[in-house]
Amino acid sequence: MTNILQAVQTYQASGLGLLQNQNCFIGTANTKFKDFENKTANLGNTVTFDLPPRFVFQNSLVVSNFEGVQQRVLPLTVNQQGAVPFAFDAEQLIFNIENNNYEEPLEKSAIAELGANVEANLASNILTSTYRFYGDGTTAIDSFTQLASALAFYRNYGAPVSDIRGYLSDIDVPTIVGTGLNQFVMNRNEELANDWEIGRFSKADWYSSNLLPLQQAGTVGNAGQVLTVISISTDGTQITLSGATASDANAIKAGDLLQFQDNVSGQPNMRYLTFIGHLPSANPVQVLATANAGADGSGHVVITVNPPLISTPGNSNQNINNPVAAGMQLKALPNHRAGMINGGKAMFLAMPRLPDQSPFVTANKYDSETGVSLRFTYGSQFGQNVYGSIYDVIWGYTIVPEYSMRLIFPA
């Protein structure tokens, strides 16, 4: 006897949780400008906010001159956009989606995808906004002692007294915690062992992220080449150096970090001045390359740097203890993953409300799990048997450079 049986297909919801990312940058960003004055914003809108002004101390009751006041500002521009769209025909919508209550998993996954990309984009600003750094790109940051040292250099330059936050590579956190279990008293050990998170340490809050940006360094950093100063522009923004590989188009990459070397024969050690007070600090002079730079046929490379290196006494922007001179040497970091210390809520994120897309059904909502403010639009193409949904968002971000320091994790 031959049986002819019907194959039966069943679908059951698994209840599996999403593979979530650690959206600590969105969760801790300063969202003061998220509504852009409660107006519907369009791509490209900019808000300018003030930075504390700078002055110069005069050691006399008889002033030689009155300083000009420079109002310092930084722009925040909403110039990022993204969407997650999907569509069904009528049969799919009825039998696969609505009958199986599949709307909620679709929504959660779409929002999580948006959140991950906003988070990674916000974190990528570390590569364009930080010029001071801790770490050499080859030695792991894997102890509480190193975190304390990084904070000491961060504060030595000048730092806000509150809201200091550190962002660490998630795969390095367990090792850091492991070292802490051998260093601290009983209560501290119990706290660490219970959750294997750093939490609050040395008056700073620490977060872990699996979305830290990767700096792909130029040849100079990866090859460990030593560059020698030839000259610097009068405004302190461009340094001409020798020592790169001849005709190397990839000598320096935007986002590379360089440090003036100590104990160079005939040269003083370069140190930053404190940001307020203009007094010598313990911080070595470190700079951010703001653009790609190739070497010419003689191995000379011209690097555009931030901040401008100013040594003129009496200038409110003076920031180094000695003039940059020919013969000084610099080294660049190799490839690395970039964490950060940031203070004073100086990392801003704006996610304005998008306008309704009439005649389609539109809703604006905030997702508590990812921290993303987004727009949901639903509609159909008349006579085309297409029913579509779109989750989308626009955003802008900025990090105030002098309030930040990059943490260097080996790539």
Image (cartoon, rainbow, N blue to C red):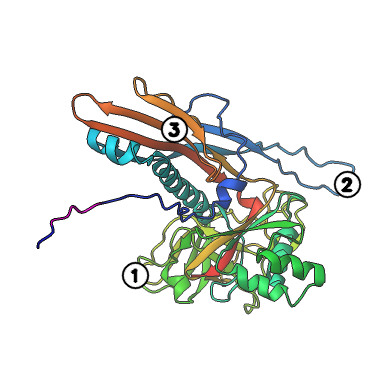
| In the image: residue 86, left or right of residue 113 | left
- Among the two numbered marks 2 and 3 on one chain, the one whose residue lies closer to the N terminus: 2
* Rendered view: 242 above or below 159: below
Mark 1 or mark 3, earlier in chain = 1
Amino acid marked by disc 1 = Ser
- Write down the region rendered in magenta: 4-8
- In the rendered image, residue 69, in percent from the top left (x then y), is placed at 70, 36
The disc placed on residue 191 is none
Q: Which residue is mark 3?
A: 375
Of residue 92 and residue 309, the one placed in the foreground of this image is 92
Q: Amino acid at mark 2?
A: Ser
Foreground: 396 or 282?
A: 396
Q: Is residue 142 visible?
A: no
Q: Secondary structure at mark 2?
A: loop
Q: Quadrant of residue 354?
A: top left
Picture coordinates of residue 23 (x, y %)? 54, 51
Tags 1 and 3 touching, CB below 8 Å: no
Q: Are marks 2 and 3 in contact (CB under 8 Å)?
A: no
Q: Residue furthest left?
A: 1
- Secondary structure found at label 3: strand
Check disc 1 and report its element: helix, strand or loop: loop
Q: Position of residue 389 (x, y in %)?
A: 34, 34
Q: Depth check: give the residue in front, 262 or 213.
A: 213
Please tell me the numbered disc located at residue 60. 2
